[in-house]
Image (cartoon, grey):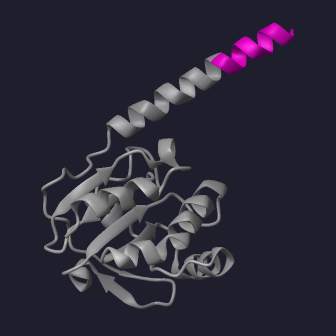
Amino acid sequence: MFIFLCVAAAVYIAFMFAKRKEQLAKRALLPVGAMAPEFSLPDADGNTHRLSDYRGKYAVIAFYPSDSTPGCSLEMKRIADRAPAFAALNAVPIGVSVQDTQSHRAFCDRVGIPFPLLSDTERTMSHAYGVVSTGRSKADRVTYIVGPTGKILYVDPDVDMNLLNIPGAWLAWLKTNAG
């Protein structure tokens, strides 16, 4: 019986990985060099943010699935811990998910997030940036670095695979390429 359960679990896990890989392949991520789509979304305090507000800076736009989940809490906390390093490189981290501003406010307070978390409840920004896989209602964990002129300069398409190393890779890219 134990061997049967192990085999069944292995088949299920393989199926889920294959399904997730198929979902990720259906995304239409924006390429490096494209102009980043403009957005206008509220943050946790209800203040409206637009991409054009960040002209002259590097916008590190981190899409994430859901407030207050273990993976998202880890990601946002690691970004928050490195906020001074981003500022030193003329970069502003911006989190984006589909939760409302109240959920974002509670998440910011609980995790200690000092940067904007934008509420994309209508999924307009998530769709424009191609981070919502077919059949899913939440954004995938994808990060874009948008340059001072609004062009996409860097795309991290599968942050889940590097969750423990972020935002180190983004900061390393900025140190090498910003300026």
Q: Residue 92's quadrant in the figure?
A: bottom left
Nearest to the observer: residue 54 or residue 43: 54
In the rendered image, residue 9 lying in the magenta stretch gets the answer: yes
Q: Which span is picked out in magenta?
A: 1-10
**In what quadrant of the picture does the C terminus appear?**
bottom left
Name the residue at the right extreme: 1
Nearest to the observer: residue 148 or residue 26: 148
Q: Position of residue 114 (x, y in %)?
A: 52, 82
- Left or right: 178 with respect to 138? left
Q: Position of residue 34 (x, y in %)?
A: 13, 57
- Left or right: 68 with respect to 62? right
Nearest to the observer: residue 8 or residue 86: 86
Q: Position of residue 33 (x, y in %)?
A: 12, 55
- Left or right: 66 with respect to 91? right
In the rendered image, residue 6 lying in the magenta stretch gets the answer: yes
Q: Position of residue 171 (x, y in %)?
A: 38, 61
Is 107 drawn above or below residue 24 in the view shown?
below
Q: Residue at x 47, y 34 (%)?
A: 20
- The main secondary structure of the magenta stretch is helix
Q: Residue at x 50, y 90 (%)?
A: 45
Is 91 drawn above or below residue 73 in the view shown?
below
Is 72 drawn above or below residue 38 in the view shown?
above
On the question of residue 107 being in view, the answer is yes
